[in-house]
Image (cartoon, rainbow, N blue to C red):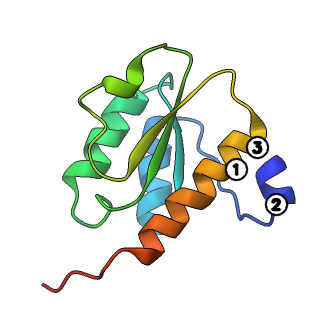
Amino acid sequence: MVLEDEGYTVELASDGRKALESVAANRPDVILLDVMMPNMSGTQVLKELQDDSRTADIPVLIMTAINGMAGGRILNGPNEVVEKPFDVHDLLNKIALAMFRVKDAPEHLG
């Protein structure tokens, strides 16, 4: 609700498979991805996103209650960890920064 109140369009997925289907159907600007999800973990979803050239450049904010995950090797590319509990203003800033970085990135040919 907070994100919608800030003007973002939000799509929810109840599990990892549905998240991947949603991303394929409607490419988002940013993905908020929980580590603990049914059917596929957030880390499995992130790996699939990173392995697909159509989605590898989408910024992903990994949401977790696992301390110290920021140094994990799965966080390649435009990704960041948001540790729970999180401050809403911090989350909004990270989302805005992720969107800015993608829009400011030089386009690649090929």
**Is label 1 in contact with label 2 (beta carbons under 8 Å)?**
yes
**How crowded is the residue under tag 2: few (<14 C-alpha within 10 Å), some, or many (20+)?**
few
Name the quadrant of the C terminus.
Answer: bottom left
Q: Residue type at mark 3: give it.
A: His
Residue 42 visible within the image: yes
Q: Is residue 58 above or below residue 42?
A: below
Q: CA distance from mark 1 to mark 3?
A: 5 Å
Dot 3: element:
helix
Residue closest to the eye, 96 or 110: 96
Quarter of the image for residue 43 reads top left
**How crowded is the residue under tag 1: few (<14 C-alpha within 10 Å), some, or many (20+)?**
some
Q: Which residue is mark 1?
A: 92
Of the image marks 2 and 3, the number of the one nearer the N terminus: 2
Residue in the image at 39% along x and 46% along y: 79
Q: Which residue is mark 3?
A: 89
Q: CA distance from mark 2 to mark 3?
A: 11 Å
Q: Residue type at mark 2: give it.
A: Glu
Residue 80 point in image, percent of width and height = 44, 41
Residue 58 point in image, percent of width and height = 40, 60
Between circles 1 and 2, the one closer to the viewer is 1
Residue 10 point in image, percent of width and height = 69, 57
Q: Which residue is mark 2?
A: 6
Residue closest to the eye, 48 or 2: 2
Residue closest to the eye, 64 or 49: 64
